[in-house]
Image (tube, rainbow, N blue to C red):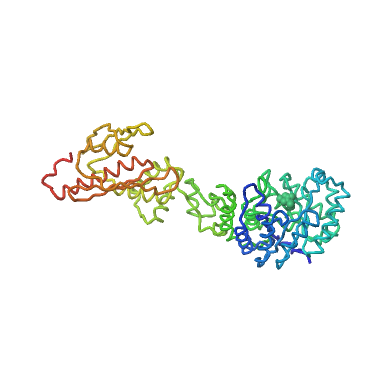
Amino acid sequence: MTDKTSQDRVVIFDTTLRDGEQSPGATMTHEEKLEIAEMLDEMGVDIIEAGFPIASEGDFEAVTAIAKQAKQSVICGLARANFKDIDRCWEAVKHAKRPRIHTFIGTSPLHRAIPNLDMDQMAERIHDTVTHARNLCDNVQWSPMDATRTEHDYLCRVVEIAIKAGATTINIPDTVGYTAPRESADLIRMLIEKVPGADDIIFATHCHNDLGMATANALAAVEAGARQIECTINGLGERAGNTALEEVVMALKVRNDIMPYQTRIDTTKIMNISRRVAAVSGFPVQFNKAIVGKNAFAHESGIHQDGMLKNAETFEIMRPQDIGLAGTSLPLGKHSGRAALRSKLNDLGFDLADNQLNDVFVRFKALADRKKEVFDEDIIALMSDQASEGADDHLQVKFLRVICGTEAPQSADLILTVDGKDQQVTAQGDGPVDATFNAIKRLFPHNARLALYQVHAVTEGTDAQATVSVRLEEDGKIVTGQSSDTDTVVASAKAYISALNNLIVRRAKTKPEEFKSVS
Ligand code: KIV
Ligand code: ZN
């Protein structure tokens, strides 16, 4: 029995747990491998290469356990071209409902030199090992490692030997990521045309990404007749990695008009498994990675956000939901326009008139100039700050500069507008906040006690906005003030001043006859 599929079907062979795990530092635990294998099985991966059973006891146990747990997928193990490797591989995969042995040997001149075999000796080794594998298992894959740097005549010769010995899939690896799309296609076409028996087996493509062409090379091979794509989640793998599963699968889905091939993959599971593989392998996904990068469905510039709000197809060629994301992200930043800000404010429950939006937009731009990304919490903080900062406040912070660091005392240079008049002072303190509060007390003397001072980082990152809450108590009366800023000391000063403004209002309400001047 072969895996020969119909002409428009491409089978997906995932090697995250074997080639992917070979990335330096990407080792996964036994439980993590089982979890990833289950996710691959559930998302419709046709063949899971679960490991290299002879490599270690741990690999053997993982492949065995994955073979036992698999529901749909074929479970494959890797073996070098010797009987011991192949036997060990079979011991592990034989528990699967649908097992496969994958055996390989390096066929290029550089790789033939390593076991010191001449062409004939290697041909004989291939015949013997594939025959041995086929006697154990009716599903055998054979790979001439470094095929793209192997002499064409010799490649045809050894592929023919492997097919005659019983291989059901012939994989053509571009082991060092050296080929280019046209060459990748020509090689598959040449093999299909020249090798007797080629029509009875499946050709696979296995591309490494050293020149960034792995996905393009794999798709070119498919167009030339390959019907199995070998790939990994997030493109994990040796050096620059492998063809990324999510890239080939989505390319075939989105451009089905020019590449009319189907896969069984449930693409809505892509994001989930990508995140899980990133977490367990310790290889984070680069922000601008195709399909699964954090920015793959994020639009920041005003023109793009405006277009997206009117019609998502203006700047998206696939829906985020297709890969399991909730939706597009329109992160607000310094390039965002009014339309995106209004839409975000509406989402957050603020419905502003045009003139109000203009005011907020000015403040938002000032904030975005200081912060890389403006989060929902920043917008909420901006709105509550807007509401709490009245033009008729008696006290306003006009200027603040603090000097702080390892050398005490810290000092604050402050200009306060007190009832319309600017007043300036420099004060010292035990830390920048203490110095600032001392400066405020010098310009606006009062007996209120600081009952609470609290700082919250409302967003992520070192450029997060801080929201500061200050509570003052005077003669049993409590007032509070709150402010947000990317500068914690500025937020502290404004929060203190806001509390004092509330105190002044409170004093005026309780003893109106005494309220002539704030100072
Ligand atoms: O890249 C490669 O050649 C491989 C083989 C073992 C198939 O991973
Ligand atoms: Zn590889």
The quadrant where residue 373 appears: top left
User: In this image, 237 relative to 317: left or right?
Assistant: right
Q: Eyeballing the image, is 432 above or below 479?
A: above
Q: Can residue 113 be seen in this view?
A: yes
**Residue 443 located left or right of residue 358:** left
Kindly give the residue lying farthest to the right in the view shown. 120
Quadrant assignment for the N terminus: bottom right
Residue 86 is situated, as x and y percent measured from the top left of the image, at 78, 58
Residue beneath the point at 66% across and 58% down: 256
Q: How many marks?
A: 0
Residue found at the far front of this picture:
57
Residue 251 location (% of width, % of height): 64, 54
- The image shows residue 139, relative to residue 465, as above or below, that is below
Closer to us: 444 or 101: 101
Tell whether 68 sits left or right of 423. right
Q: Can residue 260 be seen in this view?
A: no
Q: Residue at x 71, y 66 (%)?
A: 95
Q: Position of residue 222 (x, y in %)?
A: 72, 55
The image shows residue 519 at horizontal and vertical percentages of 17, 39
